[in-house]
Amino acid sequence: MGLGTTLLLGLLAGVTILIGLPIGRLRAASPSLRVFLNATAVGVLLFLVWDVLSAAWEPIDEALASVHEGEGGLGAAIGYGLIAVAGLAVGLLSLVWYERWMARQVGRPARPFGPGAMTVGETARVRGIASWSDARRLALMIAVGIGLHNFAEGLAIGQSAASGEIALAVMLVIGFGLHNATEGFGIVAPLAADLDETGATRRPSWGFLLGLGAIGGAPTFVGTLVGHGFTSEPVSVAFLALAAGSLIYVITQLIGVAAKARRSDLLAYGILIGLIAGFLTDAIVTAAGV
């Protein structure tokens, strides 16, 4: 398959993430609805963690099976295992460090300087991401984690097309496209709880939503381009592990937000529906022969 056609497939697989983004502009969502949407996003992301870790473990499992059958050494299994552990650690801990750094930026006092300067007790004016609300920063983290996951998916599409497995590449596009449609919802779900100083829902702009969609969906296209050029299973494992680590961190944050509402019933219902949505799309793809 030619590069142009392959890139078109990668674009189609990634663009479906835009389907769920308009939910982020819901007007005056009730507290119960916000908790439920947040919990459903947790369910979707839990499925993605399972999906990502399963894919990252597959080459390790194959290498261990080869050792058991006497057809290979432990070198490959150890190598893939170290890559997976390193990716998981970086994906998880980097977000922990980033969140702590961001908290320091938000609460950092200004340094007095010159006439009319702020006093030590006053807070410096923050700009950029540090000025965003917690809900917006959390949505950004989700988009980054999903983007890493989608880059690995793009690698699979590109590698399949480059190796001449056209039917597999097309079915991967269909399957990943279905998954990305649910991932868009997972990105914007925290925004339903984004309130201003008066308690009113702060609606994100279309530009902001499209930016999140680009962060989460564009890596599918980029991964397709990279995957068409060369095949590298270690690279795929590394990005899958990175995605898993970042998604695990985001899930803990979302559960913390839901716990504050003290609605364990809505949390359970939402997680269940999110998990069902994730496994249902995966079942559809599997039944189609992928």
Image (cartoon, helix red, strand yellow):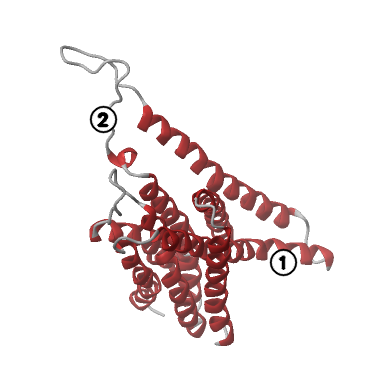
Determine the secondary structure under disc 2. Answer: loop
Comparing labels 2 and 1, the label whose residue is closer to the camera: 2
The quarter holding residue 54 reads bottom right
Determine the secondary structure under disc 1. Answer: helix
Q: What residue did someone put label 1 on?
A: 62
Please give the name of the residue rendered at 18% of the width and 12% of the height, measured from the top-left corner: 114
In the image, residue 200 above or below residue 100 = below
Q: What residue did someone put label 2 on?
A: 125
Between the residue at mark 2 and the residue at mark 1, the CA separation in whole angstroms equals 53 Å
Crowdedness near tag 1: few (<14), some (14–19) or many (≥20) residues, C-alpha within 10 Å: few
In this view, the residue farthest toward the left is 115
Question: Between disc 2 and disc 1, whose residue precedes?
Answer: 1
Please give the name of the residue rendered at 53% of the width and 63% of the height, measured from the top-left corner: 266
Crowdedness near tag 2: few (<14), some (14–19) or many (≥20) residues, C-alpha within 10 Å: few
The numbered disc on residue 240 is none
Please give the name of the residue rendered at 63% of the width and 53% of the height, measured from the top-left corner: 84
Query: Residue 68: x percent and y percent?
Result: 83, 65
The quarter holding residue 113 reads top left
Query: Residue 149: x percent and y percent?
Result: 49, 61
Please give the name of the residue rendered at 33% of the width and 75% of the height, measured from the top-left corner: 4
The kind of residue on which mark 1 rests is Glu
